[in-house]
Amino acid sequence: MSLDQALCKLLPLADISIIVSVQSLALIAVDRFGAVMLSLRSPLSSSKLCSFFILTRWIVAMTVISPYLIVLKIVEYLEKLKCQDWWNEAFGESSSLAMYCLALYVVFLYVPIALLVILYSIIVIKLKTDLSR
């Protein structure tokens, strides 16, 4: 594998870090929600559980981005090298890049952001009602 090809395959690393960051924010929100709403109970997270979640986030992110390792290839275009995806060539016509991207956005961006908004809204309402007493 040439250096060009290796660098082409490394392009999705930014996507992996975005997925991990959004998952981290969602887990922080869940932990804070538990701390505010269930303040008299034992904490939801422990150091062992945190280590598990950190490892799991990275594994999930690398797994869902791994199809790009197959579809990204260097091609020569107008006497220049270009990194291009060949989705249909790698997975066939039945698999759609658009559906894959939509699923990624929904599962790893829209749902966690909705969760953030809901959980932090509940926290704010709870804190406001407790302060007004």
Image: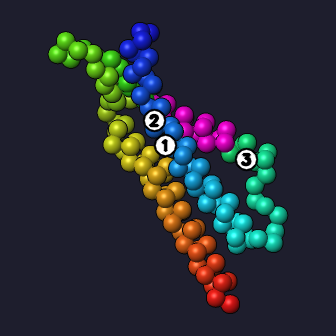
Q: Which residue is mark 1?
A: 18
Q: Secondary structure at mark 1?
A: helix
Is 2 placed above or below 9 here?
Answer: above
Is residue 63 on the magenta stretch?
Answer: yes
Q: Secondary structure at mark 3?
A: helix
Residue at point 42%, 19% (across, down): 7
Whether residue 63 sits left or right of residue 31 in the image: it is: left
x and y, in percent, of residue 131 in the image: 66, 84
Mark 3 or 1, nearer chain start:
1
The answer to whether mark 3 and mark 1 are in CB contact below 8 A is no
Q: Is residue 112 visible?
A: yes
**Amino acid identity at mark 2:** Ala
Q: Which residue is mark 3?
A: 50
Residue 14's mark?
2
**Amino acid identity at mark 1:** Ile
x and y, in percent, of residue 119 in the image: 58, 67
**Amino acid identity at mark 3:** Cys
